[in-house]
Image (cartoon, grey):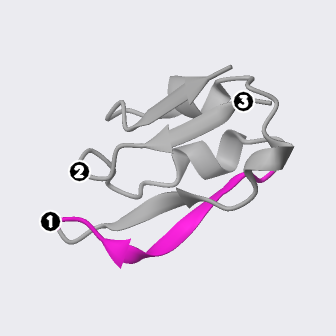
């Protein structure tokens, strides 16, 4: 099982990671970061396959994926 870590201060909630995740592991959270963006959060980590598509798509390098 892979572990996804969202670096909240880098996240701009652009949604690119959401659009590429085949298992819908991520969602837009209810908390904002210091810049006022709603931060992406892990919704269902057990479904994560560690494909790293979300991390590859993130323009702000706000996601870390560990296998």
**Of callouts 2 and 1, the N-terminal one:** 2
Kindly identify which numbered label has been placed on residue 18.
Answer: none
10 Å crowding of disc 3: few (<14), some (14-19), many (20+): some
In the depicted structure, whether residue 29 falls above or below residue 16: below
Tell me the SS state at disc 2.
Answer: loop
Residue 22 in the image, given as x and y percentages of width and height: 82, 41
Q: What residue would you read off at disc 2?
A: 9
How many marks do you count on the picture?
3
| Distance between the alpha carbons at the discs numbered 3 and 1 | 28 Å
| Distance between the alpha carbons at the discs numbered 3 and 2 | 22 Å
Marks 2 and 1 close (CB-CB < 8 Å)? yes
Q: Which residue lies most toward the left here? A: 34
Q: Tell me what residue is drawn at x 37 percent, y 76 percent.
A: 31
From the viewer's perspective, tell me whether residue 12 is left or right of residue 23. left
Kindly identify which numbered label has been placed on residue 2.
Answer: 3
In the depicted structure, whether residue 40 falls above or below residue 47: below
| Distance between the alpha carbons at the discs numbered 2 and 1 | 7 Å
In the depicted structure, whether residue 61 falls above or below residue 7: above
Residue 19 in the image, given as x and y percentages of width and height: 67, 48
Is residue 53 or residue 3 the one in the foreground? 3
Is residue 41 or residue 54 the one in the foreground? 41
Q: Tell me what residue is drawn at x 58 percent, y 38 percent.
A: 4
10 Å crowding of disc 2: few (<14), some (14-19), many (20+): some
Residue 62 in the image, given as x and y percentages of width and height: 37, 38
- Residue 2, quarter of the rendered image: top right
Q: What residue would you read off at disc 1?
A: 34
Residue 42 is one of the magenta-drawn residues? no
**Of callouts 3 and 2, the N-terminal one:** 3
Tell me the SS state at disc 1.
Answer: loop
Segment colored magenta: 24-35
């Amino acid at each position: 099982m892979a572990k996804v870590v969202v670096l909240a201060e880098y996240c701009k909630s652009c949604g690119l990671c959401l659009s590429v995740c085949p298992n819908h592991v991520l969602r837009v959270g209810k908390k904002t970061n210091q810049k006022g963006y709603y931060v992406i959060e892990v919704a269902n980590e057990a479904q994560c396959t560690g494909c790293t598509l979300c991390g590859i798509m993130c323009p702000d390098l706000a996601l870390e994926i560990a296998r």
